[in-house]
Image: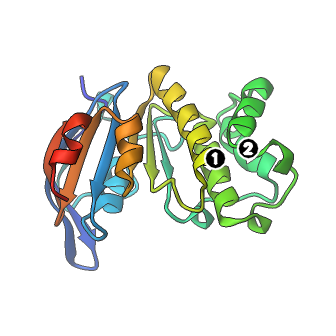
């Protein structure tokens, strides 16, 4: 059974079509990479999958037919971390979702802070951090609720490889525990290292869908 399914989805902004007939199923426990050029529709697809954008045509289907619970069912890391940083302290930012859903656990919270290399920054204001640190804060906040579907929109922003590897290993562990991961990236090496399925977008359509071993054979 699919975790989320799109059937013939059309979507866009200001009268312009960005997604043009998307058919897609994501299944529990998958680790999927979504690649494609800028403007191909990757972020728009992420917003539709996250339930933040209603299709103009077609349907978004999920088990039970209900709306996705923000944070619990679907977590989304946006390209710009400032779009989703809400509190005055890193510690509160990462704890916000679990506290709102009454599932806060101190040990799990500290594990998330440590994985994101934020433990020593937990008293800092998110807006005072570097772009890379802000990105890690936003990602840690999304990871904290261990959502059923986690969508990462270009998580490499401002990250050196050591921090990125540490975070992605944490994401991989979350995947191993059952969460579905959709990684949106321009970095084919990152996709090849972590994902097992690759989607290629071009001009608002998914033009290739296959195993990660086929990535290098697909001409982007």
Q: Which residue is mark 2?
A: 117
Q: Secondary structure at mark 1?
A: helix
In the depicted view, which residue is nearer to us: 176 or 164? 164
Say which quadrant the C terminus sits in: bottom left
Pick the residue in front: 136 or 142: 136
11 sits left or right of 104 in the view: left
Mark 1 crowdedness (10 Å alpha carbons): few <14, some 14-19, many ≥20:
some
Mark 2: secondary structure: loop
Front of the two marks 2 and 1: 1
The residue located at (26%, 36%) in the rendering is 212
Among the 4 quarters of the image, the one containing residue 194 = top left
Residue drawn 33% across and 44% down?
A: 33
Location of residue 189 in the rendering, given as x and y in whole percent from the top left corner? 38, 46
| Marking on residue 67 | none
**Which residue occupies 58% across, 44% down?**
142
| Image coordinates for residue 43, horizontal then vertical, percent | 36, 60
Marks counted in the figure total 2
> Is 88 placed left or right of 169 in the picture?
right
Residue highlighted by disc 1: 163
Q: Earlier in the sequence, mark 2 or mark 1?
A: 2
In which quadrant will I find the N terminus?
top left
Q: Give the residue drawn at x 75%, y 67%.
A: 127
């Amino acid at each position: 059974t699919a975790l989320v399914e799109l059937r013939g989805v059309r979507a866009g902004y200001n009268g312009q079509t960005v997604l043009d007939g998307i058919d897609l199923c994501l299944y529990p426990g998958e680790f999927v990479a979504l690649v494609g050029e800028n403007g191909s529709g990757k972020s728009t697809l992420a917003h539709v999958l996250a339930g933040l954008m209603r299709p103009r045509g077609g349907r978004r289907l999920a088990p039970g037919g209900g709306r996705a619970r923000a944070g619990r069912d679907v977590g989304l890391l946006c390209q710009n971390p400032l779009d989703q940083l809400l509190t005055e302290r890193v510690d509160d930012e990462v704890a916000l979702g679990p506290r709102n859903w009454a599932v806060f656990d101190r040990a799990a919270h500290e594990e998330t802070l440590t994985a994101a290399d934020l433990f020593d920054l937990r008293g800092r204001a998110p807006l005072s951090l570097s772009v890379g640190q802000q990105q890690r804060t936003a990602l840690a906040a999304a990871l904290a609720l261990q959502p059923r579907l986690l969508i990462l929109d270009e998580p490499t922003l401002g990250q050196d490889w050591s921090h990125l590897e540490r975070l992605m290993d944490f994401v991989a562990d979350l995947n191993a525990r059952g969460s579905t991961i959709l990684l949106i990236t321009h970095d084919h090496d990152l996709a090849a290292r972590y994902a097992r399925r690759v989607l290629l977008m071009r001009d608002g359509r998914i033009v290739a869908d296959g195993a990660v071993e086929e990535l290098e054979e697909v001409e982007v």
